[in-house]
Image (cartoon, coloured by chain):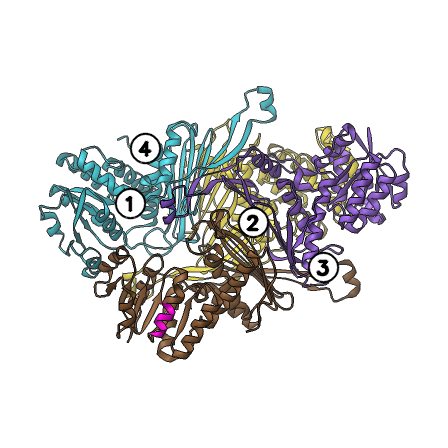
Chain colours: A cyan, B yellow, C brown, D purple
Amino acid sequence: MTGVAVIGCGYWGPNVVRNFSALEGCELRAVCDLDQARLEPLAGLYPSVRRTTDVREILDAPDIDAVAICTPVHTHFPLASAALEADKHVLVEKPLTNSVESAQLLVDLARDKGRVLQVDHTFIYASPIATIQSMIQSGELGQLLYVDSVRINLGLFQRDVSVLWDLAAHDVSIITHLIDDDPLWVTATGSSHYGELENLAYVTMVYPEQLIAHIHVNWLAPVKLRSTLIGGSKRMIVYDDLAPSEKIKIYDKGVSLNADPLARERALVDYRVGSMWAPHIEKVEPLREVCRDFLGAIATGRAPRCDGQAGLAVVRVLEAAQQSIRKNGERISLSPR
Amino acid sequence: MTGVAVIGCGYWGPNVVRNFSALEGCELRAVCDLDQARLEPLAGLYPSVRRTTDVREILDAPDIDAVAICTPVHTHFPLASAALEADKHVLVEKPLTNSVESAQLLVDLARDKGRVLQVDHTFIYASPIATIQSMIQSGELGQLLYVDSVRINLGLFQRDVSVLWDLAAHDVSIITHLIDDDPLWVTATGSSHYGELENLAYVTMVYPEQLIAHIHVNWLAPVKLRSTLIGGSKRMIVYDDLAPSEKIKIYDKGVSLNADPLARERALVDYRVGSMWAPHIEKVEPLREVCRDFLGAIATGRAPRCDGQAGLAVVRVLEAAQQSIRKNGERISLSPR
Amino acid sequence: MTGVAVIGCGYWGPNVVRNFSALEGCELRAVCDLDQARLEPLAGLYPSVRRTTDVREILDAPDIDAVAICTPVHTHFPLASAALEADKHVLVEKPLTNSVESAQLLVDLARDKGRVLQVDHTFIYASPIATIQSMIQSGELGQLLYVDSVRINLGLFQRDVSVLWDLAAHDVSIITHLIDDDPLWVTATGSSHYGELENLAYVTMVYPEQLIAHIHVNWLAPVKLRSTLIGGSKRMIVYDDLAPSEKIKIYDKGVSLNADPLARERALVDYRVGSMWAPHIEKVEPLREVCRDFLGAIATGRAPRCDGQAGLAVVRVLEAAQQSIRKNGERISLSPR
Amino acid sequence: MTGVAVIGCGYWGPNVVRNFSALEGCELRAVCDLDQARLEPLAGLYPSVRRTTDVREILDAPDIDAVAICTPVHTHFPLASAALEADKHVLVEKPLTNSVESAQLLVDLARDKGRVLQVDHTFIYASPIATIQSMIQSGELGQLLYVDSVRINLGLFQRDVSVLWDLAAHDVSIITHLIDDDPLWVTATGSSHYGELENLAYVTMVYPEQLIAHIHVNWLAPVKLRSTLIGGSKRMIVYDDLAPSEKIKIYDKGVSLNADPLARERALVDYRVGSMWAPHIEKVEPLREVCRDFLGAIATGRAPRCDGQAGLAVVRVLEAAQQSIRKNGERISLSPR
């Protein structure tokens, strides 16, 4: 029975608390937040769970085997490294940390300590992305040509991270998961119309063989969009995470280079337009899968789906994008791992 | 009575023919195409109009005062310069030419010859853009923060120009018209998955004071989108050119920096969410307005709404974007005019 | 301090419990359900509230002034009448009862006992309907011409009531609230493809001066729709309750009889097409307003917005529609009240 | 070579002219309209076609084998019967006539004369309806449970027919084509807010075994909708004729009576929710198919897809609906054919 504690009970923490309290194979033993007021509502719901404002109580508790860290981004590294040092398994809210250096340190520390380090990139555990990934791997999409992701809405401006590290972290995690490779380079442009942090950013990730991934994130948009286009040489996907049903639409459409040189004089490519198909997507709470994966990795020793390396890969892209924005869109190469 | 000829009767030319034949104050006197087969269908519709496959017949005809050039892009410069040399007024299909150098030569030639040079940037003559422009100029939008334009669909791959020079020419014309200034610099990335020419491109145009304009054009998208977001500090606009009605939606939404420093600790910005308003948009054929403006400029000597300078401004951005793509996303500064 | 109990803790009851426990001016003192298992989850959330499976405990309790009845429809009458007899104020889940006779008895009993009788027609307490009603009353819509309401989805088949008494109860409550009059007559057609109860029904309510209200409810539809059209002689409204924003769209559109007899030869009517406007709708939980209104009516003696008479008016239409379905669409007149 | 003439060159006639002039196997020889001004524009387009304002010229012409009648509805019977009497094959704009009696006379006359009588119910010749029909016939939809059709917009008020005979004629033709049987009875309600003719109507068609078809037509709606739901016991279809693509969506959804009596206590039905599929629909002009079918029927002697009987079936329903409206929603039985 894995003893679990949740550190940070603001916006996301209570959801993590709810899931760990419901899952078998673990026991939620403690919750922690600097702000006592955030712990109160949990008392009624989980009367048997210890509550503390002192994180040392969590780290020193021998009945706590694993911690979930749901705190502001800049605290991820100190809290996660302290937890690993205390021999806890660690699940960190996304993004893993706010720099490649600190993310690498966590990865190394987890390896040295033989502990699970997992990042809660929720979308990677959601049914739509699993469906898309299996279509890419089975070859149904053909060669991947582009990924275009739009994640915009009005607010919610974060206090400690820009729209890049907040919203684009989702898109980068999806893209690096689907493409399963580092981009050759990254360029990005952003604006910070209010305060210091960007509220609008465009990120371009360039891969070999003309594969491009592009992200548009915006906290100042009048409409809310969560839309990703995935273009393959055989089929194309529109993934609309806000659609109440048919979140994924697979279009049997494509073009092919006209084989006949004479015909190519007339038209370079042939178009193929077939039917559209929206597979039924199981409704499961992705966070439930995140927590289940964490517990399974602890129990069996296998790596979780989003391990420290996956979290590091996301931070590498975000940091490069951040650099590019600071340098007015300069191309930032990702050094080979 | 202005005598008009149309050169090029492929896809767009017949629409120009139809409009000039219907407008008062001019007489459509000749149509020209290298391909006789394209002229045949016009015989029944406009029996009194001369048809020729020899452009010299048009240029030498004393009863032709003005020509509309609706031919492939690489022929715009030779045809337009020949027409100006022959003292004709010239309306050119978009984009004006395929290089800044040739566009500048046309502008200079038109000035020297005292002839009208106009580009058919159709959207500039459409009611939605006029509505948006008047809202910007009246201050109703507040300070302009960003323009985000998406123009994607499956095909139609062009033979002589990339998706940049074909589709993005529309977006660049809209952006340079609305912002009425050159960007400081341009970055762009593109892919040419089939053949030499890009079928997918992202263009970022950076202006002073954090104003960003961004374009996504794609000939390999499974769905057709024509959507432009315009963010102002007071109001925001969604312009969906494919909407059967309510093409423009004005959102009375925005954020403002929290004035109270203490409150700012809690939340950086305040959100304002009001009503949405979709003004009635007159349904007029923009091309009719293009032709009308051309005839008016000829008759009165005033500059047309999209004169050579406006066309040149578009080509400046497109050429810079093309250079950036070739140089892997390098930042291309636009030299001051 | 009004002492409140909630009877019935299945699907809707827990929401009523949550609201009464949060509102000031009352104290939630007891919850009741025949099924002990439904009471368990409430123990943790509301430890100080009494729990019982015996409704007599509620009715006999001197510290309970008011009860909310959230049980199956066929139990509304016996429970509500018993509660009124026990001098409790009563809030009943919609519809009030399953027959005009029993609804009338409740109304009479509440009057005789001097107790509040209110029906939880939730939509009447929602912001969109309040907005629409105020537009009708202010004359902005002009003369009301028609109301067309569609409420369809796949499932959820109820065990004790048909789609008419379940879903159409919402639409009838909206229509009788907005029109504020009984229809002259009702016709209806329905199908019961599975079991005895209708899963699909169409109801037509005819009013004086050509005003028609029409309802389409369906438990066997592949898509979920909650859409009401309201046609006025000056303006028209589309109310889409599923829209994430802009739930109400007001169209400045209409037709008018062509005044000129000669012009009328050519075209009977003139069309007017203006702008569209979506007013900002406050996001409040309608059920909170239901409970607040109930407490206010108890405290002040004024009638609640949806009193017994309003609930009876809905039952009159539903019963007439049911009769019409049974009699193959026969016209059922509503006797004057 | 079939010689064809088109009578009536108002709104729809020119489209019929264009199609017959383009089809092989026929020669468009004459066009006729009472209004000379409507014939003028056709002179330039079809210089070799005779133009006349006298219908007798058409009927007496020995080189005219077939006529298409595109005139106001009340003239369909006199013109079509005169044409049949003159031994012409006849294609009539929808609806066939404005009464069952006259429609029956035309059917009888065509049979006696051995001439083709066809009605231009355009939707029957459109790809979406053909796709739906083949799904019904193949059993893929299972048992047909309901058809629900909505055809609403602002205007265009017709001068000689109500919204029932104008718009609902389309829906009735689709329903009678798909169900291929007369309804047992029809009820309808309508309003004529401006003038004598209904501008809003609801029609219910009841078939054996609980199958219901329902139509909502409205000339006073703020939005334009062309949407048909088709519910089968195995699958359900949403047909949106205004969708730019994916006009037909097939939902693999349904319910089934819970077989286990014990389980039925808990839930009457089981729900099945599978994927959605939008088959590629060929883009063909339906009117082209109408004209082609007409010529084929003339050439081979086989009945056209929409022969006089099909047109009569539509008129039977429309006349019954009209009677029901006049009699305040009374049920009108259709006498067996």
Which residues make up the magenta segment? C79-85
Residue C81: in magenta span: yes
The residue carrying mark 4 is A182
Q: Nearer the viewer, mark 2 or mark 3?
A: 3
Circles 3 and 1 on the same subunit: no
Circles 2 and 3: CB distance less than 8 Å? Answer: no
Label 1: which residue? A287
Residue type at mark 2? Ala
Left or right: A145 as drawn, with respect to C331:
left
4 vs 2, front mark: 2
Q: Amino acid at mark 1?
A: Leu
In this rendering, do the residues under marks 2 and 1 share a single chain? no
Mark pair 3, 4: CA separation: 68 Å
The kind of residue on which mark 4 rests is Asp
**Could you tell me if the residues under marks 3 and 4 are in contact, i.e. CB atoms within 8 Å?**
no
Host chain of mark 4: A
Which chain is indicated by disc 1?
A: A
Residue farthest to the front, as pictured: D261
Q: Is residue B203 magenta?
A: no
State which quarter of the image contains the C terminus of chain A: top left
Circle on res. B243: 2
Of badges 3 and 1, nearer the viewer stands 3
Element under disc 3: loop
The residue tagged 3 is: D197
Foreground pick, A266 / B78: A266
Residue B303 seen in render: no
Asked if marks 4 and 2 fall on the same chain, the answer is: no
Q: Secondary structure at mark 1?
A: helix
Say what secondary structure mark 2 lies in: loop
Quadrant containing the N terminus of chain A is top left
